[in-house]
Image: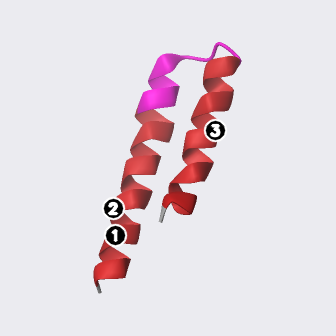
Amino acid sequence: MLVATGVPIGDAAIVLRSNGPKTAVYGVHGATAVVMLTISLLLLAA
């Protein structure tokens, strides 16, 4: 479950380290991590 969210969190860390826009970090990568976590929880519950 946490492995699935590792990719967007890792991407967010890369964008933060390269002084990228914080809207991309939280808006794109953060939202993707939340969606992936939600979907993985739903799949585990099914």
**Residue 6 covered by magenta stretch:** no
Up/down of 23 relative to 46, above or below: above
Closer to us: 46 or 2: 2
Magenta stretch: give its range. Answer: 18-26
Q: In the picture provided, is 35 more to the left or to the right than 2?
A: left
- Location of residue 11 in the rendering, given as x and y in whole percent from the top left corner: 63, 38
| Mark 1, secondary structure of its residue | helix
Number of residues whose C-alpha sits closer than 10 Å to that of mark 1, classed few (under 14), some (14–19) or many (20 or more): few
- Residue position marked by numbered label 3 in the rendering: 11
Q: Are the residues at dot 1 and dot 2 in contact (C-beta closer than 8 Å)?
A: yes
Residue at image point 50% right, 39% down: 29
Could you classify mark 2 by the number of other residues whose Cα lies within 10 Å: few (under 14), some (14-19), or many (20 or more)? some
The amino acid type found where label 1 is placed reads Leu
Q: Going by the picture, which residue comes out furthest to the front?
A: 2
Q: Is residue 6 left or right of residue 17?
A: left
Residue at the spot 44% in from the left edge and 38% down from the top edge:
30
Q: Label 1: which residue?
A: 41
Q: Secondary structure at mark 2?
A: helix
Magenta segment includes 20: yes
Q: Are circles 2 and 3 on residues that touch, CB within 8 Å?
A: no
Residue in view at x 30 percent, y 74 percent = 42
Name the residue: 29% across, 86% down: 46
For the residues labelled 2 and 3, the Cα–Cα distance comes to: 19 Å
- Left or right of 33 in this view: 9: right
Marks 1 and 2, how far apart at CA: 5 Å
Looking at the picture, the colour scheme in use is secondary structure
* Farthest residue, direction bottom: 46
Where in the figure is residue 13, as x and y percent of width and height?
62, 30
Q: Earlier in the sequence, mark 2 or mark 3?
A: 3
Residue 38 marker: 2
Three-letter residue code for mark 2? Thr
* Count of numbered marks: 3
